[in-house]
Image (cartoon, helix red, strand yellow):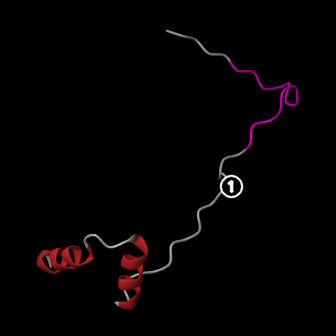
């Protein structure tokens, strides 16, 4: 298997990303990339003064 991968890498060496994607798609080995998500999956922090019951203490050692 590694020999086949070596030959594919040699054949695609120096090709642009679009050319590599087209070659892999033609071979049936490529799926389109999922779109990059601009939104973060993190929970937003409350604004200042909104959550007065939250207390945070940090001890530096």
Query: On the picture, is 12 further left or further right than 39?
Result: left
Q: Does the magenta segment cover residue 32? A: no
| Helix, strand or loop status at disc 1 | loop
In front of the other: 10 or 42: 10
Q: Does the magenta segment cover residue 49? A: yes
Query: On the picture, is 36 further left or further right than 39?
Result: left
At horizontal 11% and vertical 77% (from top left) the residue drawn is 3
Query: On the picture, is 4 further left or further right than 25?
Result: left
- Where residue 12 sits in the image (x, y, percent)? 27, 76
At horizontal 41% and vertical 81% (from top left) the residue drawn is 30
Q: Residue furthest left?
A: 3
Image quarter where the N terminus lies is bottom left
In front of the other: 41 or 27: 27
In front of the other: 4 or 9: 9
- Where residue 35 sits in the image (x, y, percent)? 59, 68
Seen in the picture, residue 55 relative to 41 is either above or below; the reply is above
- Where residue 56 sits in the image (x, y, percent)? 70, 21
- Give the prevailing secondary structure in the magenta stretch: loop
Pointer 1 residue = 39
Residue range (magenta): 44-56
Q: Residue 47 lies in what quarter of the image?
A: top right
Seen in the picture, residue 6 relative to 39 is either above or below; the reply is below
In front of the other: 52 or 23: 23
At horizontal 58% and vertical 11% (from top left) the residue drawn is 59
Using a 10 Å C-alpha cutoff, classify the residue at mark 1 as few (fewer than 14 neighbours), some (14 to 19) or many (20 or more): few
At horizontal 71% and vertical 45% (from top left) the residue drawn is 43
- Where residue 57 sits in the image (x, y, percent)? 67, 16
């Amino acid at each position: 298997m590694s020999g086949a991968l070596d030959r594919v890498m040699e054949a695609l060496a120096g090709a642009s990303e679009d050319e590599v994607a087209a070659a892999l798609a033609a071979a049936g080995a490529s799926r389109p990339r999922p779109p990059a998500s601009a939104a973060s999956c993190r929970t937003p922090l409350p604004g200042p003064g909104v959550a007065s019951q939250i207390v945070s203490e940090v001890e530096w050692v």
